[in-house]
């Protein structure tokens, strides 16, 4: 009975200690509606660390502070789960919006950001695009994705419960440190073309793993909310650094815990030190782990003893044995000098048994190692075959003079080049894969793209065609493909490394403080146009890039342009003028005609390049949702030309020099022609490249443009540019009349 009473007392003490790690005081609730409430959170002011960790319990549900936000889970790893509404946008058959089924969803918690590592932003629908709007500091930011499909997706055993892959459903990562988010869903055509099976657009943020897409969801999404994860931390960015520097408990972490910065601008989190476990924020948290009750490194078979103490343990040998007691040390061996000779035989036998066991263990280990190596080799060979390696080698061998240009790398080479694809080596992520910086064995820097292609025979065929065609391209303004690796689960492409970032990094004032002159911008535009023209007309099989944008134009240290990222490109045989594809591209650069018809042709690249020209002229991004008059740069640019406000939207720094005015006007009208709605009215990329090269040639050889040879357009420009931009004050009336007619023609014809 006394023993039973002692056991019950120990159980009660352990339970009390567990509750103490949850709540700060005995009268503080440690659970509400089945949800544990660990400190620094608490119900009531005296139970939590501060007001940001106050919770409210109504008996069955736990709420964040006094709001209506329900808390479903709190993790000591720094994450909190809450349910968050889906934003629907529904239409009736006549194209009218159903008001009670169309609204945005907002979340206002200024203390904690939405977790970028634990969530995904998702849009569901066949005529849908969704936005995630938020703030980073004082700036408003938006991101989103679109999904369009022309026919009904039939639920099958293969696609029910699949991940959101882009057809009928799209998903993107959440930007880090986003607070106070708003979710909005929209429709391109009010679901008129797909109303029979999908009359609603949906957008939401969901915890990874909580949502699996099914085609049935296009007819009806069976839930109104999904779990969302918030990151929580102690909001004092300097306390962790100060505590570490002063070696004093200057943070809320207890004495057996250490602090770790969440971000340098927000705050920090607490972690129990090695050898301890529990709640690092609670004064009584971080209890010692008894390593002796778990598998450890003591030589137990050699009679070693494990000794536990706070934060660690030690091993020792019993009397009659020598050694340190550790498996990785000298272990425990019988001291022969303490025994008489009759026991020597027993010692020899014991040593013989140990040696036999050691040999057996070594043999088994070698067999396991050999089996592992053979298995890995078979996996590499299977991946090589599945990724089309044999077909690619055959195709390359048929390309006389080109086979040596494309190297087939092995998996180990690229793992060593990227430190096993360490996240610190990531240069960027995109819809077609992740790009890493690598250093080959000969110290050559390369960019290694980890593709998302895998398994689908049609995708493998397109991938092989892309590698074969790109291996034939040797253009100074196209990023060179050095080789590929097919031994991995998904193919890896190895490109030359371009060291000066993207074009957007250099023309966006928020990213680059150094101004790029108009001469450099014009040269970059001409080099890019010439490269795209080469792809369209000079390659053995014409290539439509399909994702021309300022982030896919790389610059080297001399600001020379390099067109990159051919993951979305399409090969178009010479006997075809266009191809029907699933719409793919980037908002702001996407050809409206291609978006509506799904018919891809070379003029789609012309439209995207026209948007890049407008970016070079204005210094603005293609899409900025905080732009008051029009978020879409192309539409804003067209409106400005129609309203004779061109000079108001051009980059002010480009107008400082009087000599830029004529070229700016010429390039502006060229850009306007490139972004016409009707693709047939756009010039070809060859024509665009020739016009840009002509402008550069005129600038390089001023003797070609005497006073009498100045075009009527240039004369008009020199008259009508405002004085503050350095315009000339006189011109002949003939030039004025001619240019006035041309302006009217451009505006009328461009709609």
Image (tube, rainbow, N blue to C red):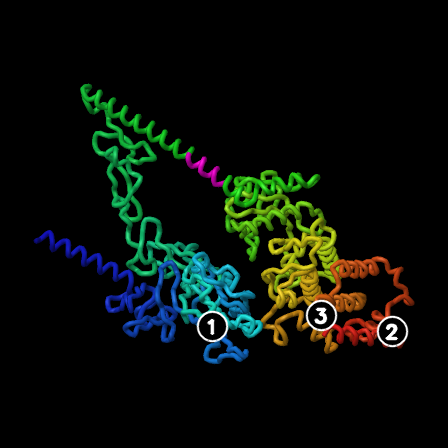
Q: Are marks 1 and 3 in contact (CB under 8 Å)?
A: no
Pick whichever of labels 3 and 2 is earlier in the sequence: 3
Q: Secondary structure at mark 2?
A: helix
Q: Is residue 107 above or below residue 120?
A: below
Q: Is residue 286 toward the left or the right of residue 95 in the image?
A: left
Coordinates of residue 273 in the picture (x, y in percent):
35, 51
* Residue neighbourhood size for the residue with mark 2, other residues' Cα within 10 Å, grouped as few (<14), some (14–19), many (≥20): some
Q: Are marks 3 and 2 in contact (CB under 8 Å)?
A: no
Tell me which segment is drawn in magenta. Answer: 371-380
Coordinates of residue 206 in the picture (x, y in percent):
44, 64
State which mark lies toward you, 3 or 2: 2
Task: Determine which residue is flagged by label 3.
Answer: 650
Q: Secondary structure at mark 1?
A: strand
* Residue neighbourhood size for the residue with mark 1, other residues' Cα within 10 Å, grouped as few (<14), some (14–19), many (≥20): many
Q: Residue furthest left?
A: 1
Task: Determine which residue is flagged by label 2.
Answer: 735
Q: Is residue 540 toward the left or the right of residue 220 in the image?
A: right
Q: Is residue 644 toward the left or the right of residue 319 in the image?
A: right
Question: Marks 3 and 2, Cα distance to the nearest angstrom?
Answer: 24 Å
Image quarter in which the C terminus is found:
bottom right
């Amino acid at each position: 009975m006394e023993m039973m009473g002692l056991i019950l007392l120990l159980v009660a003490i352990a339970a009390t200690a567990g509750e103490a790690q949850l709540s700060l005081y005995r009268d503080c609730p440690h659970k509400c509606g089945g949800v544990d409430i660990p400190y620094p959170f608490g119900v009531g002011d005296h139970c939590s660390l501060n007001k940001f960790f106050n919770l409210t319990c109504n008996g069955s549900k736990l709420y964040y502070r006094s709001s209506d936000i329900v808390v479903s889970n709190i993790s000591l790893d720094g994450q909190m789960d809450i349910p968050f509404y889906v934003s629907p946008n529904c239409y009736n058959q006549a194209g009218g919006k159903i008001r009670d089924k169309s609204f945005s969803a907002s979340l206002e918690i200024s203390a904690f950001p939405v977790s970028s590592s634990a969530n995904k932003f998702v849009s569901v629908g066949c005529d849908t695009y969704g936005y995630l709007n938020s703030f980073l500091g004082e700036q408003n930011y938006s991101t989103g994705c679109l999904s369009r499909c022309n026919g009904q997706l039939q639920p099958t055993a293969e696609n029910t419960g699949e991940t959101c892959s882009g057809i009928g459903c799209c998903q993107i990562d959440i930007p880090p440190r986003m607070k106070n988010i708003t979710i909005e869903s929209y429709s391109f055509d009010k679901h008129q073309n797909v109303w029979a099976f999908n009359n609603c657009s949906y957008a939401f943020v969901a915890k990874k793993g909580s949502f699996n897409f099914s085609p049935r969801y296009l007819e009806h999404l069976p839930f109104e909310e999904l779990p969302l994860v918030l990151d929580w931390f102690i909001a004092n960015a300097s306390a962790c650094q100060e505590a570490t520097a002063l070696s004093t408990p200057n943070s809320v972490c207890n004495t057996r815990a250490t602090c770790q910065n969440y971000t340098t601008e927000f705050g920090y989190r607490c972690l129990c030190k090695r050898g301890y476990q529990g709640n690092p924020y609670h004064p009584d948290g971080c209890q010692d782990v008894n390593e002796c009750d778990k598998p450890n490194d003591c030589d137990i078979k050699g009679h070693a003893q494990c000794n536990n103490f706070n934060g660690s343990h030690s091993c020792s040998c019993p009397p009659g044995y020598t050694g340190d007691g550790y498996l990785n040390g000298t272990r425990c061996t019988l001291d022969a000098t303490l025994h008489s000779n009759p026991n020597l035989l027993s010692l020899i036998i014991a040593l013989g048994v140990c040696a036999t066991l050691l040999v057996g263990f070594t043999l088994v280990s070698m067999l396991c190692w050999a089996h592992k190596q053979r298995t890995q080799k078979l996996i590499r060979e299977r991946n090589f075959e599945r990724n089309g390696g044999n077909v690619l080698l055959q195709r390359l061998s048929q390309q006389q003079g080109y086979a040596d240009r494309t190297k087939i790398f092995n998996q180990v080479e690229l793992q060593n080049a990227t430190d096993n694809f360490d996240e610190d080596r990531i240069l960027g992520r995109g819809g077609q894969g992740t790009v890493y910086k690598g250093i080959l064995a000969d110290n050559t820097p390369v960019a290694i793209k980890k593709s998302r292609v895998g398994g689908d025979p049609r995708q493998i065929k397109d991938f092989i065609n892309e590698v074969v065609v790109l291996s034939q391209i040797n253009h100074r303004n196209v990023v060179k493909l050095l080789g590929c690796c097919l031994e991995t689960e998904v193919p890896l492409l190895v490109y030359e490394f371009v060291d000066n970032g993207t074009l957007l990094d250099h023309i966006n004032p928020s990213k680059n403080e150094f101004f790029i002159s108009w001469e450099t911008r014009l040269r970059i535009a001409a080099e890019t146009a010439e490269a795209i023209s080469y792809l369209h007309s000079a390659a053995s099989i014409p290539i439509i890039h399909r994702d021309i944008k300022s982030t896919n134009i790389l610059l080297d240290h001399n600001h020379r342009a390099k067109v990159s990222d051919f993951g979305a490109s399409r090969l178009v045989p010479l006997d075809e003028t266009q191809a029907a594809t699933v719409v793919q591209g980037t908002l702001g650069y996407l050809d409206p005609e291609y978006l509506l018809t799904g018919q891809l042709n070379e003029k789609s690249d012309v439209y995207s390049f026209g948007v890049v020209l407008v970016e070079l002229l204005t210094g603005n991004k293609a899409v900025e949702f905080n732009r008051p008059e029009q978020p879409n740069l192309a539409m804003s640019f067209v409106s400005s030309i129609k309203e004779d406000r061109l000079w108001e939207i051009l980059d002010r720094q480009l107008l400082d020099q009087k000599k830029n005015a004529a070229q700016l006007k010429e390039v502006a009208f060229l850009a306007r022609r490139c972004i016409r709605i009707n693709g047939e009215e756009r010039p070809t990329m060859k024509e665009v490249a020739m016009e840009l090269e002509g402008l550069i040639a005129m600038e390089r050889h001023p003797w070609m443009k005497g006073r009498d040879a100045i075009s009527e357009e240039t004369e008009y420009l020199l008259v009508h540019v405002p004085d503050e931009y350095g315009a000339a004050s006189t011109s002949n009336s003939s030039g004025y009349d001619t240019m006035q007619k041309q302006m009217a023609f451009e505006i009328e014809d461009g709609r």
